[in-house]
Image: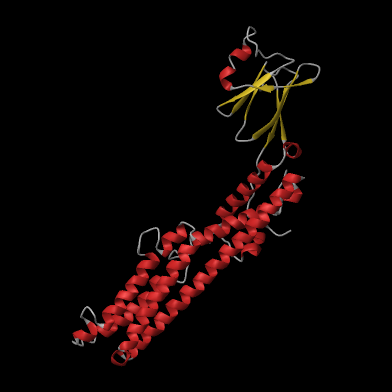
Amino acid sequence: MATFEAQVEGLTSLSIDGSSAPTQTELTQYLTDGAKEILNILPVEKKMTYSTSNALDNSTTYLTLGGSEILGVMRDDGTINQPCRRIPSTLSGRAQDSAEMIFGTTSDPVWWVVNNILSIYPEPGSSGATVQTLAYPAVAYGDSAITKFPDEAEYLVPIYAAIKSLQNVMGNFLSNDNIDHASTGALALINTALDRIASYNWGDSDTFTSGNAQLTRVKNALDQASDIINGNSPSSTTDAFGAQSNEDVELTSSALSIASTELNRAQQHLAEWSAISGVASSEAQGFIAEAQARIARDNQKYQWYQGQQVKLQADYDKGLQVIMAV
């Protein structure tokens, strides 16, 4: 059977390694979290199938739980196993006082938990006691099966991890390390081309330096596009980076659309004086077209990831319903 990493890659079209988004370490955590969530929703009768028996006796009278779910506690009275009743830890003292109604006896023992330690009263004797717990498995990205886990639910674990992996990649999608750098790459090249034009030292303020000059308007449009992408415009939560971090798909798409409009405006201003700027203007126009193409491509990719996440979430929820009904 394929490893869980390979299954997640197949579900998401991602390529996962030690430095990807997500990393293999993060994928392992997603798989482990998924297995825990699935086990938690199982009916108690089903959980008992995958439980662990922990034996106690007069040499080991208590159990350190370590986060495991407690499914049942029994104490041997010398003849049969008696079910233990749970009491609040605040009543543990009274449960050991024979004058109290909640006093624990060999035929009616009690148990409680304090500081992650399960105690039984009367303490287990030589005949012992048993605590049934549900331990959560650790699932690594290189595994292909999970021990003490329902076979019919195992396919849900990589689906859960795939959903979290897509959330991870979308969370990193607009960061400088994970996209085609429409803002810091192509826009930077546009500014380089414009700087070359300025270096010609043409002193025509109507063309290059006045507030209404074509070049000034081009620069303004480019700055607007950059601010909308990652310049806190109109705020740190509503530029493209901020909206994406908040998983606001509609606002992210809107910001990218506005950025593209600003790039169109820059292109129109460039056209007004392309005859003057010559080769450098053509170069800048080419970079603007490249930036627009990158924004469109990245937006399309982001939408695909978001759509795939929705589909996988529906498959996962449906699978959980089936498992709970069994």
The vertical placement of 250 against 222, above or below, is above
Q: Residue furthest bottom?
A: 275
Quadrant in the picture for the C terminus: top right
Question: Which image quadrant for residue 108?
Answer: top right
Name the spot of residue 197 as percent of width and height, x first: 28, 85
Quadrant in the picture for the N terminus: bottom right
The vertical placement of 200 against 145, above or below, is below
Q: Is residue 13 left or right of residue 130?
A: left
Q: Is residue 325 left or right of residue 261?
A: right
Name the spot of residue 293 as percent of width and height, x first: 47, 78
Q: Residue furthest top?
A: 99
Q: Is residue 17 left or right of residue 197?
A: right
Question: Which image quadrant for residue 279?
Answer: bottom left
**What residue do we see at 65% from left, 57% from top?**
314
**What residue do we see at 72% from left, 23% from top?**
129
Numbered label tally: 0
The vertical placement of 17 against 31, above or below, is below
Q: Nearer the viewer, residue 178 or 166?
A: 166
Name the spot of residue 290 as percent of width and height, x first: 44, 80
**What residue do we see at 75% from left, 45% from top?**
325
**What residue do we see at 43% from left, 66% from top?**
176
Q: Nearer the viewer, residue 195 or 204?
A: 204
Q: Is residue 142 visible?
A: no
Q: Report the colour scheme.
A: secondary structure
Name the spot of residue 128 as percent of width and height, x first: 73, 21
Q: Is residue 264 visible?
A: yes
